[in-house]
Image (cartoon, rainbow, N blue to C red):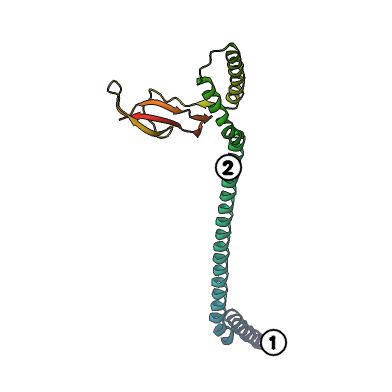
Amino acid sequence: MSKDENKELNEETVKTAAVEGDNNLTEEASTSGGSPDEASENPASQESGEAETDSRDARIAELEEELERKEDKYLRLLSDFENFKRRSAAEIQAAEKYRSQRLMLELLPVLDNFGRAFDAEVTSEDALALKKGMEMICQSFRSAMEKEGLEEIEAEGKEFDPNFHHAVMQGQDDSKPSNTVLEELQKGYMLKDRILRPSMVKVNE
C-alpha cells in the first residue's frame, strides 16, 4: 500500500471516530437531561409527595391528640378510683371505731336512771344494802361502756361551749364569771372523739 493510500485511510478513521464521539456526547446529553415529557412531570410528582407528607403529618397529629385525651381520661378514672378507695377505707375505719354507738345511745337512759336512783335518800338497812348492790352493778356497767370508749363530758364550773353543752336555763351568780356552767341538769357523753349527747346545763348570765 502506498503512502497516499495510508494517508487517506488514516483521515477516514479520524473522521469516523469524530462522528462516533459526537454521537456518544449527544446520547449522554439526552440521557442525563431526560425527555421533555419527564421534565414536565417532575413538579406534579413533587406536589403529590408533599400532599402525602402533609396528610401523614395531619394523621399523626390527630392520633397524638386522641392519645392525649385517652391518657387524660385514664388519669381521671385512676384519681376517682383512688379517692373511692380512700373514702371506703375511712368509712370502714369509722364503722369499726364507732361500732357501738347505737348501743351506747340506747344505754345512756339506763345510766341516767341509775343516777336518779342513787340520788334518792334511803334510811333502812335493806334499802341501803339494795342501793349498795345497785352501785356495784352500775360501776360494772359503766366500766364495760368505758372500755368501748365512753367518756363523760365535764360541765359544771366550766366555760359554756356549745359544742359540748346544751343550755336550757340561765342563772346569775356574781361570784362566777359570765358564761360559766352553774349546774349540770343531765350528763353528757362522748364516744371516743364523737359526741353522743351534749350536757344539758344551766349557764351564768
Q: Nearer the viewer, mark 2 or mark 1?
A: 2
Q: Which mark is residue 95?
A: none
Please name the residue that numbered disc 2 is placed on.
86
Secondary structure category for the residue under label 1 = loop
- Residue at the (59%, 11%) spot, across then down: 125
Secondary structure category for the residue under label 2 = helix
Q: Amino acid at mark 1?
A: Ser
Image spot of residue 79 (x, y percent): 56, 49
Residue placed furthest toward the right: 1
Quadrant location of the N terminus in the rendered image: bottom right
- Specify few, some or many for label 1: CA neighbours under 10 Å numbering under 14, 14-19, or 20 or more: few
Could you say which is closer to the camera, residue 25 or residue 44? Answer: 44
Q: Is residue 120 above or below residue 79?
A: above
Q: Is residue 190 above or below residue 25?
A: above
Image spot of residue 154 (x, y percent): 44, 24
- Residue at the (58%, 64%) spot, across then down: 63
Give the CA distance from mark 2 to mark 1: 118 Å
Q: Which mark is residue 2?
A: 1
The earlier-in-sequence mark between 2 and 1 is: 1
- Residue at the (57%, 78%) spot, across then down: 48
Quadrant location of the C terminus in the rendered image: top left
- Residue at the (38%, 29%) spot, across then down: 202
Image spot of residue 118 (x, y percent): 53, 20
Could you say which is closer to the camera, residue 179 or residue 63? Answer: 179
Tag 2 near tag 1, CB within 8 Å: no
Could you say which is closer to the camera, residue 172 or residue 176? Answer: 172
